[in-house]
Image (cartoon, rainbow, N blue to C red):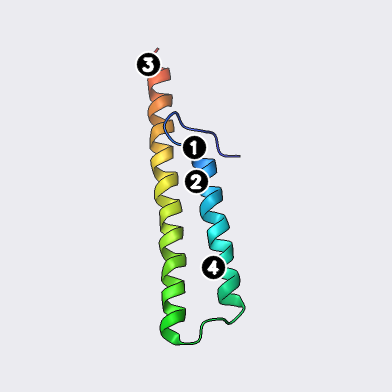
Amino acid sequence: MIPESKFIDTYYFTNEIEKELEAIKLTLASGSCTSYDGYRYMVGIVEGMEKSKTILQDIANKFRNADDDDNDDN
């Protein structure tokens, strides 16, 4: 489990993104895309969601590190 930040619940957001990604990946795997353009569109969605997860995790890590630095000063 990912620890919670004071400002955002990264665990919740990451799980929600993962649920959506699974649904899209299942759609891709089932062969439901009828054209290459449709396939590219779905892959683009997956790439964007993966990037969103990375950005969210980076922001949460910055907050955690800032909290750790504040606690070290005391």
Q: Quadrant of residue 63?
A: top left
Cβ atoms under marks 3 and 2 closer than 8 Å: no
Tag 1 secondary structure: loop
Please name the amino acid that badge 4 sits on.
Answer: Ile
Where is mark 4, residue-wise?
A: 24
User: Which one is earlier in the sequence, the residue at label 1 or at label 4?
Assistant: 1
Quick one: label 4, few (<14), some, or many (20+) residues within 10 Å? Answer: some
Where is mark 2, residue-wise?
A: 13
Which residue is painted at 58% across and 63% down in the image? 22
- Give the label on residue 9, or none: 1
Label 3 vs label 2: CA separation? 30 Å
User: Which one is earlier in the sequence, the residue at label 2 or at label 4?
Assistant: 2
Q: Is residue 36 above or below residue 26?
A: below
Label 1 vs label 2: CA separation? 7 Å
Label 1 vs label 4: CA separation? 23 Å
Cβ atoms under marks 1 and 2 closer than 8 Å: yes
